[in-house]
Amino acid sequence: MRGRASTDDQEAFRRSVRAFLTERVLPHVAEWEAAKGVPKSLYAEFGRLGVTGIRIPQEFGGAGEKSFIYNAIFAEEVMHTGAVSGALQLHLNVVLPYFLELATPEQQARWFPAFVSGESVTAIAMTEPGTGSDLAGISASAVLDGDSYVLNGAKTFITGGMNADLVVVVARTSRSEADRRAGLTLLVVEEGMDGFSRGLNLDKLGLKSQDTSELFFDNVRVPVANRLGAEGNGFTYLTANLPQERMSIAMSAQASCERAIGLTLDYTRERTAFGTPIASFQNTKFVLAGLSAKVEAGRHMVDRALEELDEGVLSVADAARVKLFTTEVQAEVMDACLQLHGGYGYMLEYPISRMYADARVSRIYGGSSEIMKVIIAKDLGL
């Protein structure tokens, strides 16, 4: 399968990431899944590898890389090797852009060096128990009192919430009857702030090494100096970052499809039934051939969208198309590949079973498939 062209630097980065994941991470996957999270020290190891500082400006010790391709390479290698990275990709692909675009010089100087070293990681708290995908329905409130906001509310399903040093909380600072989207503000809550607490590390169907938690805010005083961007503009900021967030999900879904097909090809060539390799059966050939065509189409969609993202022209609707296609194909690929593994595919010792469980959330988070269809239909003028 043809992939996008890579520079020598990108290939060197890919090799270093693959070696690190294979040697340092793979031996501990089962242990970290049982613990429902990776050790926080792993993020500092990624820092020493250079992963966490790729897009941080050079004056703070980062590489100052503008392209998102290095993030894509990291995501692909996590999937292709079968390794895990906890909530690091959420930090790098979804949360960090808000800091890069909105942080003041003082905030950059305060937070960026620890981002580069991997000693500080972030999470973003949008989802509330009663809102789901309805960001305009957020009820967590922040009231300005002197030089601080007093924050109250609860968030749930927060990826990386247990380990995050900084949490970007989407809170309502004002309400408009005319526009439900108005009045949302991004506030950075720091670990240790009075009134900030974490609930359960939630049990999930898949992505078990990625901590996912409840967060509670009880009269937390958040300094105005911890506000990202202008007060009341949160919805606009969140919408602007949606293409990259959805591409993060899409490229991981694509890479998991490619790995699943490779694993299934190997299995069906080795496994025999009725004295014949499973790969020789017409059904096996037709299933894998059909999946291969769809996955190839997904690769071209992802690579083109990554180019457009780097150029700053990837639209919300086109990002939705890529996410919808790749995650729906991912569901089909995982189901069919597990089926071709037979009973062994249902056993946890075979990687396809974990991939099957991990894949299910791709059609839910970052905007469900149904939301993607609404966005695409609107773009069509429907």
Image (cartoon, grey):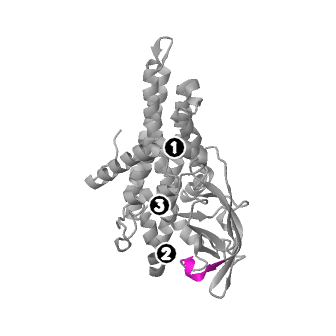
Overall secondary structure of the magenta stretch? strand
Q: Amino acid at mark 3?
A: Leu
Q: Amino acid at mark 1?
A: Val
Please provide percent x and percent y for residue 91.
51, 61
The span picked out in magenta is 221-228
Q: Residues within 10 Å of mark 3 (few under 14, many from 20)?
A: many
- Against 363, is 64 above or below? below
**Residue 219 appears in view:** yes
Please provide percent x and percent y for residue 72.
41, 53
Mark 1 and mark 2 lie on one chain; the one further toward the N terminus is 1
- Against 69, is 241 above or below? below
Which callout, 3 or 2, points to the residue nearer the camera?
3
Please provide percent x and percent y for residue 73.
39, 51
Where disc 2 sits, the SS reads helix
Nearer-the-camera pick, 151 or 256? 151
Which callout, 1 or 3, points to the residue nearer the camera?
1
| Mark pair 1, 2: CA separation | 35 Å
| Mark pair 1, 3: CA separation | 21 Å
Nearer-the-camera pick, 109 or 371? 109
State the residue position of label 2: 102
Answer with left or right where residue 380 lies relative to residue 179: left
Residue 201 numbered tag: none
